[in-house]
Image: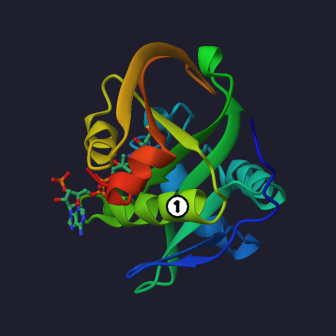
Amino acid sequence: MWVRYSKVKTIETDRLILRKFVNRDLEDLYAYGKLDTVGPKAGWMPHPSLEHSQKILNHFIAGNDVYALCLKSENKVIGSVGLHQTKLGEYGEVYELGYVLSTFYEGQGYMFEAVKAVLDYAFNELNLEKIYVGHFLENDRSKKLINKFNFHYLNDYDYESRDYGIKRSKIYCMTIEDYNKSGGLK
Ligand SMILES: CC(C)(COP(=O)(O)OP(=O)(O)OC[C@H]1O[C@@H](n2cnc3c(N)ncnc32)[C@H](O)[C@@H]1OP(=O)(O)O)[C@@H](O)C(=O)NCCC(=O)NCCS
């Protein structure tokens, strides 16, 4: 069952501020949204124009489930984390984590830091009981990230991606009990 949460809370980590997207993030969103190394790995096409990014940004601003990852040292948005209320086949109404990071900032532990912060918030403050996450079969970087956390593998399944149709994927879940064992870490 979903519980309703009404806003994106600002969360600060060592190197990042996780916060709601705002209009001035447009250029930053476009800078990573247009890369062909980002969206397709998450099921959406690279942004073809600034206007396209504006539509996506409007959607983020209107919603309550997507965090902008603002890198403190550059005061720049370098990616996003979503905690989406979604329907996931046999699992029903679930909370699903999704994330993308600008390719230029990979390999520095930024997404690890962001995901850890969102899990802490979701389990400790939103009191969620279970969070799901998935990746396309070929997405080794995402798999590696998920495997740093105490998610357990559930199944392979056909994920209906936004722009590329069905993509064979792996799905994982973390319960509040899994989280409490180790603060969400392996
Ligand atoms: C998936 C994705 C978020 C992974 O990003 P990432 O930078 O590899 O992830 P992490 O934040 O965990 O960083 C891990 C890397 O940082 C390094 N690192 C440095 N300091 C670290 C720290 N304090 N903690 C953890 N890792 C650290 C690790 O060695 C690791 O590097 P390696 O994988 O090259 O060995 C990113 O590749 C991405 O967004 N890709 C495009 C979109 C996408 O695939 N989205 C997911 C759809 S399911």
Badge 1 is on which residue?
118
Task: Answer above or below: position of 23 versus 49.
Answer: below
When asked about the image quadrant of residue 36, the answer is top left
Task: Answer above or below: position of 178 versus 11.
Answer: above
Residue 47 in sight here? yes
Q: Say which quadrant the N terminus sits in.
A: top right
Observer-nearest of 41 and 117: 117
Q: Is residue 4 left or right of residue 44?
A: right
Residue at (54% x, 44% y) in the render: 97
Observer-nearest of 173 and 114: 173
Observer-nearest of 184 and 105: 184
Q: Disc 1 residue type? A: Val
When asked about the image quadrant of residue 26, the answer is bottom right
How did the renderer colour the structure?
A: rainbow
When asked about the image quadrant of residue 86, the answer is top right
Residue at (25% x, 50% y) in the render: 186
For the residue labelled by badge 1, is the local secondary structure a helix, a strand or a loop? helix
Where does ligand 1 appear, by image quarter?
bottom left
Whether label 1 lies within 8 Å of ligand 1 gets the answer: no
Give neighbour class at mark 1: few <14, some 14-19, many 20+ (Cα, 10 Å).
Answer: some
Residue at (41% x, 61% y) in the render: 116
Q: Residue 27 location, x and y as percent?
A: 61, 67
Q: Residue 60 location, x and y as percent?
A: 73, 56
Task: Answer above or below: position of 12 versus 94.
Answer: below
Q: Is residue 139 left or right of residue 21?
A: left
Q: Residue 79 location, x and y as percent?
A: 50, 60
Residue at (73% x, 72% y) in the render: 22
Q: Residue 77 location, x and y as percent?
A: 53, 70
